[in-house]
Image: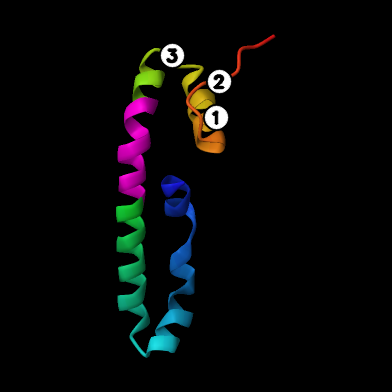
Amino acid sequence: MLIAIFWIPIWLAAPLVARLIDQPVGSITITIALIQTVIGLIGVLFAGRPTLTLVRHTKMRAAPRKIWHIIWTGKLDEPEAV
């Protein structure tokens, strides 16, 4: 979830927020980008360890599919093919 929040372009709301609180748009954009980056890094820290372990034991060709499955479902285990 935290990684997904990192991908959302929340900084696009900077002009609206700047107008509401009467601050320069540039400083609001930088603040939002910094907060988003910290949230994304926290998400990578939590999700990165188990994901890295799973990917290390996966063939390189299958790794992107497994990573996408983890991001999309939030689950580390992938259902077996029938």
The dot on residue 58 is: 3
Residue identified by numbered label 1: 69
The dot on residue 78 is: 2
Indicate whether 22 appears above or below 74.
Answer: below
Q: Quadrant of residue 18?
A: bottom left
- Name which residue type carries label 3: Thr
- Name which residue type carries label 1: His
Question: How far separated are the C-alphas under marks 1 and 3?
Answer: 13 Å
Q: Residue at x 44, y 80 (%)?
A: 17
Q: Which residues are magenta?
A: 40-51
Q: Residue at x 54, y 25 (%)?
A: 65
Display colour scheme? rainbow
Question: How far separated are the C-alphas under marks 2 and 3?
Answer: 12 Å
Q: Residue at x 45, y 12 (%)?
A: 59
Question: In the image, residue 67 lies at what x, y percent?
Answer: 48, 29
Indicate whether 76 appears above or below 7.
Answer: above
- Name which residue type carries label 2: Glu
**SS category of the residue bearing label 1:** helix
Crowding at mark 1 (Cα within 10 Å: few <14, some 14-19, many 20+): some
Crowding at mark 3 (Cα within 10 Å: few <14, some 14-19, many 20+): few
Question: In the image, residue 2 lies at what x, y percent?
Answer: 42, 48
**Precedes in sequence: disc 1 or disc 3:** 3
Magenta span dominant secondary structure: helix
**SS category of the residue bearing label 2:** loop
In the drawing, does residue 1 fall left or right of residue 50? Answer: right
Tell whether position 38 is magenta: no
Question: In the image, residue 58 lies at what x, y percent?
Answer: 43, 14
Q: Residue at x 48, y 48 (%)?
A: 4
CB contact under 8 Å: marks 1 and 2: yes
**SS category of the residue bearing label 3:** loop
Q: Nearer the viewer, residue 42 or 15?
A: 42
**Which is closer to the viewer, label 2 or label 3?**
2
